[in-house]
Amino acid sequence: MRALCLTLALALSALLPACVEPDLGDEPLLCNAGTPRCPHDYVCVAQKDGSEHCVREGSARSATARSDGGVAELDAE
C-alpha cells in the first residue's frame, strides 16, 4: 500500500508543471504562416524589416495591432 501511495504521489507531481503556462515575454516568437498566427493572448505585428513577430496583447508594441486578426505594421525599435 505504501508503494502504491508513493507511486501515485510521484505521478501526480509529474503532472503539475503541465498545468502552468510559461511567461513568454512581450515579443517571444515569429508569427506562424498558418492558423493560428500566434499563441493565445498574442497578436501578429509586422516589423519595418518585413519580419512578423507575435506581440503580447496589451503591451506597448501591440497598440497598433489590427483587431481583425490581420498583420499590423509597426516600426522596428
Image (cartoon, grey):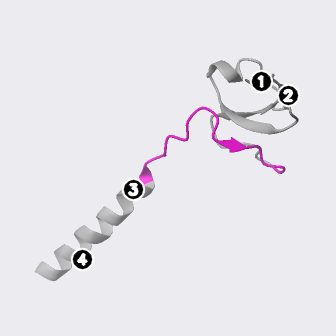
Q: Please tell me the numbered disc located at residue 7.
A: 4
Predominant secondary structure in magenta? loop
Q: Looking at the image, is mark 3 or mark 2 earlier in the sequence?
A: 3
User: How many numbered discs sit on the rendered protein?
Assistant: 4
Q: On screen, 70 above or below 65?
A: below
Q: Secondary structure at mark 1?
A: loop
Q: Is residue 25 magenta?
A: yes
Calculate the distance from the C-alpha at mark 4 to the C-alpha at mark 3: 17 Å
Crowdedness near tag 1: few (<14), some (14–19) or many (≥20) residues, C-alpha within 10 Å: many
Using the image, tell me which numbered label, if any, was put on residue 17.
3
Q: Residues within 10 Å of mark 4 (few under 14, many from 20)?
A: few
Cα–Cα span, label 3 and label 2: 38 Å
Q: Comparing marks 4 and 3, which lies closer to the viewer?
A: 3
Label 2 belongs to which residue? 48
Work out which residue is located at the far right of the displayed protein and give it: 50
User: Could you tell which of marks 4 and 3 lies nearer the N-terminus?
Assistant: 4
In front: 61, or 9? 61
Inspect the image, locate mark 4, and give the three-letter code of the amino acid beneath it.
Thr
The reply to whether residue 43 is visible in this rendering is yes
Q: Which residue is mark 1?
A: 65
Residues at marks 1 and 2 touching, judged by CB atoms closer than 8 Å:
no
The magenta stretch is: 19-34
Which numbered disc flags the more N-terminal residue, 1 or 4?
Answer: 4
Q: Residue at x 77, y 26 (%)?
A: 76
- Magenta stretch containing residue 68, yes or no? no
